[in-house]
Image (cartoon, rainbow, N blue to C red):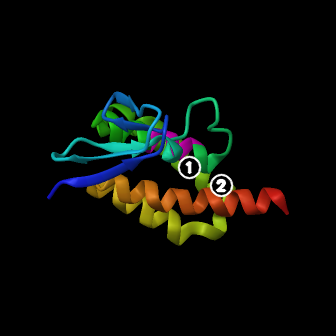
Amino acid sequence: MPLRVELKPFERIVIGETVLINSGTRTSFLIDGDAPLLRERDTVSAETANTPAKRIYHCVQTMYLKSDVARYRAAYIGHLKELRQAHPDCSEAIALINAHVSAGTLYKALKEIRKLIKREAARLAA
């Protein structure tokens, strides 16, 4: 079943290693296939990956978009250790993230990491 995507003017979407940029008007289209995709607002760049949760998000995002878990596995393990040390109270969430990565359901892992990023931001703001 195709995925319907709506983009605001000049909004971007990443499909695999390709970035699509919308023109100056709102548009919608259907995507049919298994290519990994993320809206630009759901991405973290290497420059903005400045917390443990954002660093692991960037790593898993790269695994997902490049469809190459093995290549980034060592970096992922390092970021996972860092995340566990920074957030010992989030062990259940971290275990769920790791289970998703181990099962190859990387998009679900990204959704869980986004929750941790929100928690992290709330702690830093307090």
What SS does tag 1 mark?
Answer: helix
Q: Amino acid at mark 1?
A: Lys
Residue in view at x 47 percent, y 45 percent: 8
Q: Foreground: 18 or 59?
A: 18
> In the picture shown, does residue 59 fall above or below 4?
above
Work out whether residue 82 can be spotted: no
Q: Amino acid at mark 2?
A: Gln
Does the magenta-highlighted stretch encompass residue 57? Answer: yes
Instruction: Name the residue at the right extreme.
Output: 126
- Residue range of the region highlighted in magenta in the rendering: 55-60
Q: Disc number at residue 81? A: 1
Work out whether residue 32 can be spotted: yes
State the image coordinates of residue 98 (x, y, percent, origin top left): 41, 58
User: Whole-Å distance between the Cαs marked 2 and 1?
Assistant: 6 Å
Q: Do the numbered discs 2 and 1 sit on residues whose CB atoms are within 8 Å?
A: yes
Magenta stretch: dominant secondary structure: helix
The quadrant of the rendering that contains the N terminus is bottom left
What SS does tag 2 mark?
Answer: helix
